[in-house]
Amino acid sequence: MSGPEGAWGAVLETMSWVGLVPGIPLLLLGWILALRACKWVATTAEVFEAGGFQGFRWSDGDGRQYSILHEPSEVPMMDVGARVGLYYDQCHPSRWSLARPRRTNAAILIGSILTGIGLLSIVAGFILMAL
């Protein structure tokens, strides 16, 4: 092919390689990371005070008790004995949040975009060849 079709063909083939070669490994990496990630569990915790610090005390579904102290600057002061909604990481209970954690996986996002660009470039290249 010569002329504009040849140039478009070269651009589309380059885009297919640029999209698929890094995109598919990034998708695989993102899926592996998503499978290995621990779940965050919602629970109700009780506010307690120890040594001038406040903390949260809660138990999981298996009956294990957890408690953690936090800096006064991390969380607003609450009444001792108050019940609050708490989210914690099942694998690492010391990781907690009062707000629902957002799980983002940049590898899946970028891998999906690049793989999509690569696949669209392949389809567009076949269409260009059929014309």
Image (spheres, rainbow, N blue to C red):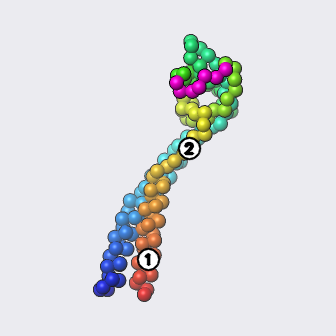
Location of residue 130 (image quadrant): bottom left
Q: Tell me the residue at 59%/19% (across/down).
A: 54
| Residue found at the very far top of the displayed protein | 51
Residue 95 included in the magenta stretch of the image: no
Q: Secondary structure at mark 1?
A: helix
Q: Which residue is located at x 57 percent, y 23 percent? A: 68
Local packing at callout 2 (Cα closer than 10 Å; few below 14, some 14-19, many 20+) is: few
Q: Give the vertical position of 103 relative to 26 (above or below).
A: above
Closer-to-camera residue (117/90): 117
Residue 31 image offset from top left, x and y in percent:
50, 52
Amino acid of disc 2: Arg
Residue 22 is at least partly visible in this image = yes
Horizontally, residue 79 falls left or right of residue 74, namely right
Three-letter code, disc 1:
Ala
Q: Is residue 74 magenta?
A: yes
Q: Magenta region's main secondary structure?
A: loop
The residue that label 1 is drawn on is: 124
| Relative height, residue 92 to residue 129 (above, below) | above
Identity of the residue drawn at 60% across and 33% down: 98
- Could you give the CA–CA distance between mark 2 and mark 1, rounded to whole angstroms? 36 Å
Residue occupying the point 64% across, 23% down: 78
Per the image, the residue denoted by label 2 is: 102
Q: Is residue 40 left or right of residue 123?
A: right
